[in-house]
Image (cartoon, helix red, strand yellow):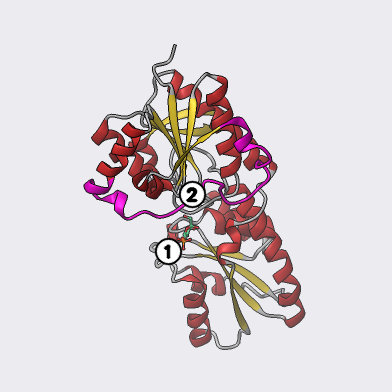
Amino acid sequence: MSPIKCIGLLTSGGDAPGMNAAIRAVTRSAIYNGMTVKGIYRGYKGLITGEIVEFKTQNVSNIIQRGGTILKTARCMEFKTPEGRKLAYENIVKEQIDALVTIGGDGTLSGARIFAQEYNIPVVGLPGTIDNDLFGTDVTIGYDTALNTIMECVDKIRDTASAHERLFFIEVMGRDAGFLALNGALASGAEAAIIPEISTEKDQLSEMIEQGIRKSKNSSIVLVAESEITGGAMGIAERVKKEYPDFDVRVTILGHLQRGGSPSAQDRIMATRMGAAAIDALLEDQRNVMIGIQNEQIVYVPFSKAIRNEKAINRDLLNVLRITSS
Ligand code: F6P
């Protein structure tokens, strides 16, 4: 019999499509294994203020297809302080929660890690972020849906880009990672991607123009990863206006629409597998690990590795993009 009788479940940080599928899987797997589930609203904020409600199997009915998170989410500054975490722990004791399952990105896992160290409570994390920037997992929950959204948007922008023979810079999310920009460019047949991972190594804009981005084409689309390092789509477009005034340039920032929508089949399946694996991990006495997927297999990644290591982008894909868009 597992010593864990009750788990607390929360989503934190930026929402990602598939979080609800993960909530459903964690809840049902926990109940299947005889545990009680307490849903914590608004991430760490709700843990501090005590917004905690018992979740039964019907609480998670009819949510697998919904974007956002039924538990709501927040970016909680108070949890970054020892005083905030103390209040959170008091609610853990009050609610008789034996372990936590947290769903979110880098900030969520960092919070989980420090909390687990301070209060010796088992925590398992699920990687929920559209950015795909967590080390130790091939993909994160929400990334595939966001990529599909980007692809659909670029397909539409291409119509007008082509009609007006313009150069479009389309900014996509990713915090400081270029996964959405690079793979979004491959999926939509964009001419290039400007990503933070190589921004300090070379001037991607001048290289792109020198390679004759529009030699044989009358319109071009370039995906730019949001980041101070790339300068974002606005920054790049300003440069083009000054340095290459012949181009008719436009900018589109896709913004938060990338975070919405019904999760793709892949995100639902992955979130479901990872959610069930979180309960398996607790039953196996694992603690302070993130559930990851590597080569289709579930893996346990220590928080220290998932957070600290920078996940490398596959640079070969830049070459594939360059060749296939030439
Ligand atoms: O981490 C997910 C993410 O969508 C990033 O891609 C983006 O930089 C950030 O969150 C935006 O955060 P917020 O919704 O708080 O503005």
- At a point 49% along the width and 61% down the height, the residue shown is 195
Q: Does the residue labelled 1 lie within 8 Å of ligand 1?
A: no
Query: Can residue 148 be seen here?
Result: yes
Q: Position of residue 94 (x, y in %)?
A: 33, 33
Q: Where is residue 114 in the image (x, y as percent from the top left)?
A: 28, 40
Dividing the picture into quadrants, the one containing residue 26 is top right
- At a point 66% along the width and 41% down the height, the residue shown is 64
- At a point 49% along the width and 26% down the height, the residue shown is 36
Magenta-drawn stretch, dominant element (helix, strand or loop)? loop
Amino acid type, callout 2: Ile
Q: Considering the image in quadrants, where does the N terminus appear?
A: top left
Q: Position of residue 249 (x, y in %)?
A: 60, 82
Confirm whether the magenta stretch covers residue 71: yes
Residue position marked by numbered label 2 in the rendering? 313
Q: What is the number of callouts on the image? A: 2
How far apart marks 1 and 2 lie (CA) works out to 13 Å
Left or right side of 187 for 37 = left
Above-or-below relation of 310 to 159 = above
Dividing the picture into quadrants, the one containing residue 187 is bottom right
Amino acid type, callout 1: Ser
Residue position marked by numbered label 1 in the rendering? 199
The magenta segment is 56-84
Toward the top, the furthest residue is 1
Given residues 131 and 56, the one toward you in this image is: 56
